Image (spheres, rainbow, N blue to C red):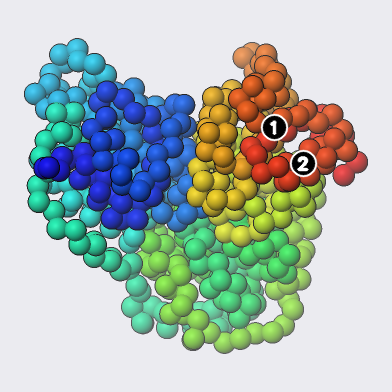
């Protein structure tokens, strides 16, 4: 039988090592599903396209492969636009394949089902590459381009829309050869020599690490120990060095103590970080500035010219750059860097108010029960606390939506996608407000037998926004929420669930959650948690 475009698309994805896709079938995408059953690709059915996109995001961060989502025309594309924008902000590889109305009706305003005026323009605003397929011969070349972006550039969402009438057409002949590997940019030897000279001459070097360098964790550890430099990790870089490493600073560069550390450094090496305000200036104190020598390494040339101005800007993949640099570095063994790091950690901790310190202690308790598991957060108080001051057991073991694009409703589906990728346990941190954005996705964890422990931090509303209103002397409107019985809803969906009204009940619930292997929801009141004698 002749292969259709829909069947060929699925086959080409499988050829590129895609084994999981997220989505919701619809009348406009059923031809994608014709070849799915025998492809070896597992389909995860979300309850909303936004959930599918966030699951793909969490899956990508843990697996290191692009998260793939199938969505329908119009509403489906709009629903996944928010996850695409979150992935765009955090440089997460994602491939979104959407239907679009038949070619004769594109742009005609004919009132067709799911018709969205200029759908491709909406998608292009939240993707690094987008295309409307108009001919069967374009399919493989476009997928080659998409995976080249994932392999060799700063990643992000890639969008492909296929007219409904084209899905079922005969595909063009496509030789089943694996796509060619693409090399990442490497710096010239002269640049490596220059960086090595600067670092070897430094007396108080500092390393700043962003999410773009998270894959280079081992090389960063070796570098830090060689040149004796503290390592400051942004939110998406937490775990590059584990919290017990004496050079690790798992504290936000928005904190005064960390800013002072950077100001005192004679050489700052910034790896894979964009100097975004949600990491470097969340208190709006003014741009994060480095007065002495700044060396920036990034895979995206545009990022090298935004934020802090570097004396030396290097276009390169961080891991490849560090492997080239390491042989030229001179080893230093004095303990001054450890002292600088320890003093910065202590001063940063003292900057936190009592509530934030107590929230960090709750996180410490969670890490004691789940010491090696990824923690995935929504925009909620526990997440904010961890972003300010908290480590992770490894790279990509702490990520959330509270920086960058800042979407609510991220935590639950992203934690499910991460658990599917790891085939292990993940911990989700989410507030009662954020959970109501994505409550239906809890059942997907049961359906997929994903071991996610959902920690619901309940303050009966949008607590952080309420604090902003109070601080600005604005009458609090719209922030108090009627919260449902989350435990009853979770039990009805098939999860294990409990409300913890004390430290003992909380710890018992955590122990039980580890042992069952089932998706589990543990709800705790904010004031109860903070009153615990931790």
Decide if residue 104 is on the left or right side of residue 444. left
Residue 469 makes an appearance in the image: no
**Where does residue 291 sit, x and y in percent of width and height?**
55, 63
Name the quarter where the C terminus is drawn.
Answer: top right
Decide if residue 381 is on the left or right side of residue 175. right
Question: Residue placed at 10% from the left, 40% from the top?
Answer: 170
Q: Which mark is on residue 496?
A: 1
Identify whether 307 is placed above or below 209.
above
Residue 137 makes an appearance in the image: yes
Front one among 173 and 235? 173
Which of the two labelled residues, at mark 2 and mark 1, occupies the earlier sequence position?
1
Labels 2 & 1 near each other (Cβ < 8 A): yes
Q: Which mark is on residue 512?
A: 2
Name the quarter where the N terminus is drawn.
Answer: top left
Identify whether 454 is placed above or below 93.
above
Question: Residue placed at 36% from the left, 66% from the top?
Answer: 315
* Residue 104, picture quadrant: top left
Front one among 207 and 392? 392
Identify whether 113 is placed above or below 224.
above
Question: Residue placed at 50% from the left, 67% from the top?
Answer: 216
Decide if residue 526 is on the left or right side of residue 162. right
């Amino acid at each position: 039988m002749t292969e259709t475009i829909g069947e060929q698309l699925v086959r080409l994805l499988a050829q590129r090592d895609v084994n999981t896709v997220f989505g919701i079938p619809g009348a406009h995408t059923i031809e994608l599903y014709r070849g799915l059953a025998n492809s070896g690709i597992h389909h995860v059915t979300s309850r909303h396209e936004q959930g599918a996109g966030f699951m793909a995001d969490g899956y990508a961060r843990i697996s290191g492969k692009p998260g793939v989502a199938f969505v329908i025309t119009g509403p489906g594309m709009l629903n996944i636009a928010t996850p695409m924008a979150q992935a765009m902000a955090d440089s997460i590889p994602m491939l979104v394949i959407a239907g679009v109305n038949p070619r004769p009706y594109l742009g005609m305003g004919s009132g067709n089902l799911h018709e969205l005026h200029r759908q491709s323009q909406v998608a292009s605003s939240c993707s690094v590459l987008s295309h409307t397929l108009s001919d069967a011969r374009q399919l493989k070349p476009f997928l080659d381009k998409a995976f080249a972006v994932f392999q060799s550039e700063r990643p992000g969402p890639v969008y492909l829309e296929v007219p409904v009438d084209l899905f079922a057409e005969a595909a063009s002949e496509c030789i089943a050869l694996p796509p060619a590997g693409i090399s990442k940019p490497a710096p010239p030897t002269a640049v490596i020599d220059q960086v090595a000279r600067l670092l070897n001459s430094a007396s108080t070097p500092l390393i700043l690490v962003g999410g773009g360098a998270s894959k280079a964790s081992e090389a960063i550890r070796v570098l830090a120990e060689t040149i004796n430099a503290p390592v400051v990790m942004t939110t998406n870089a937490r775990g590059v060095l584990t919290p017990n490493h004496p050079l690790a600073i798992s504290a936000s560069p928005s904190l005064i103590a960390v800013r002072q550390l950077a100001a005192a450094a004679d050489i700052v090496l910034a790896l894979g970080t964009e100097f975004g305000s949600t990491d470097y200036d969340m208190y709006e104190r003014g741009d994060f500035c480095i007065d002495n020598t700044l060396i920036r390494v990034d895979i995206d040339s545009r990022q090298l010219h935004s934020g802090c101005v570097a004396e030396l800007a290097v276009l390169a993949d961080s891991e490849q750059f560090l492997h080239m640099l390491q042989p030229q570095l001179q080893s230093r063994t004095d303990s001054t860097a450890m002292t600088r790091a320890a003093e910065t950690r202590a001063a940063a901790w003292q900057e936190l108010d009592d509530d934030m310190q107590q929230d960090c202690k709750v996180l410490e308790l969670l890490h004691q029960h789940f010491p090696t598991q990824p923690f995935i957060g929504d925009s909620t108080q526990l997440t904010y606390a961890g972003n300010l001051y908290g480590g992770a057991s490894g790279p990509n073991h702490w990520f959330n939506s509270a920086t960058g694009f800042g979407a609510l409703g991220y935590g639950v589906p992203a934690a499910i996608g991460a658990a599917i990728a790891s085939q292990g346990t993940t911990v989700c941190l989410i507030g009662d407000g954020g959970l109501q954005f994505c409550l239906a996705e809890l059942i997907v964890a049961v359906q997929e037998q994903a071991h996610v422990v959902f920690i619901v931090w309940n303050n009966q509303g949008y607590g952080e926004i309420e604090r902003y209103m109070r601080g600005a002397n604005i009458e609090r409107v719209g922030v108090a929420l009627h919260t449902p019985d989350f435990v009853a809803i979770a039990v009805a969906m098939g999860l294990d669930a409990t409300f913890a009204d004390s430290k003992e009940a909380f710890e018992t619930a955590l122990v039980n959650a580890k042992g069952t292997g089932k998706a589990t929801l543990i709800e705790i009141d904010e004031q109860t948690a903070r009153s615990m004698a931790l």
